[in-house]
Amino acid sequence: MTKPRPPHHKDLADLCAEAYNSHTFAVRQLEGLHKVMDIKVDEWSRAQVVALRGTEPLLKGGWADVVRDLMVYPKHIPDVGVGHAGFITGGAHVFETVVPFLSLHKPIICTGHSLGAAVAQVLALLLKQSGLPVIEYVGFGRPRVLAGQRDWGDVKMTHYRHSADIVPLLLPPGLLYRHPVKASVIGKRRFWPSFKHHDITHYCREV
C-alpha cells in the first residue's frame, strides 16, 4: 500500500519549479526562493520555506552548476562532515546567505530539485545544528550527497524519485555517498534509468 503524501509536498514541488524562473536570493549562481507559506505541519500552520533550483543548461549560463555537479571528490566541512565537495560547499554558501532573513519563531522547511535538492539537504543540516527550527526536508530527484548517515532528530525527511529518474542513482553506494532515507517512487515505474524522467515538471505533476 502506498503511503499517502502530505498535500503541501505538491506546493513545494511547484515552488522548486518557480525557482528556475525567479529567485529571492542568489549566491555563487545558486538561486532559490524564500517564502512564508500556509502549510500545515504538525501543530504549525505557517512555515518558512527555502527552495533551490537544479542545474541550468550550459546554454542558459549554467556552467557554474555543471562544475559544481562534477566536483564529486570528498570534502570535509565542520558540522557537515564528509560529502560531495560541490554540494556541501554550495550548502555552506547558501547557509551564510539565508541565515540573516530566517526567523527563530517560525518552522523552516528546506526543499529543492536535483542539484538544489542536494544543496538544500546540506542547508537543512547546517540550520538544524545552528539551533534554527528546521522541521522538514523534501528533495525531488536528489543525487547522493553525504558519506555515511547523520542524526536528523525529529526533522521529517522525504526523498522523491520520479519513475526511472537516473539522477538519484548516480554516484553508486560503493563510491562513498548515501541517501539519508529510501526514495519514494512516484509516477509509472520503469526499468531502465533515464534523464528524461528527471525534469521538475514530472515531479510537479505526480506528487
Image (cartoon, helix red, strand yellow):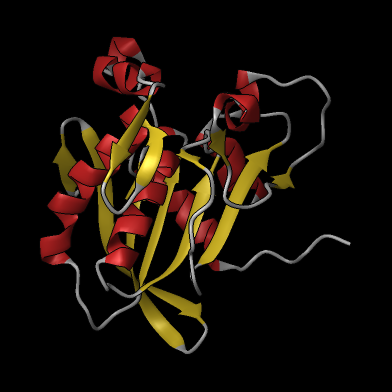
Residue at point 60% right, 68% down? 7
Q: Residue at x 62, y 68 (%)?
A: 6
| Any part of residue 113 in sight | yes
Asked if residue 60 lies left or right of residue 8, the reply is: left
In the current view of this chain or complex, which residue is farthest to the top?
59
Report if residue 21 is visible in the image: no
The quadrant in which residue 164 appears is top right
- Quadrant location of residue 9? bottom right
Q: Position of residue 61 (x, y in %)?
A: 24, 16
Query: In the figure, is residue 138 to the left or right of 122?
Result: right
Residue 63, relative to residue 6: is it above or below? above
Q: Residue furthest left?
A: 100
Q: Position of residue 69 (x, y in %)?
A: 38, 22
Query: How far across and how far down the image is residue 16, in percent?
Result: 41, 46
Q: Residue at x 73, y 35 (%)?
A: 163
Q: Residue 63 versus residue 57: which sits nearer the camera?
A: 63
Quadrant occupied by the N terminus: bottom right
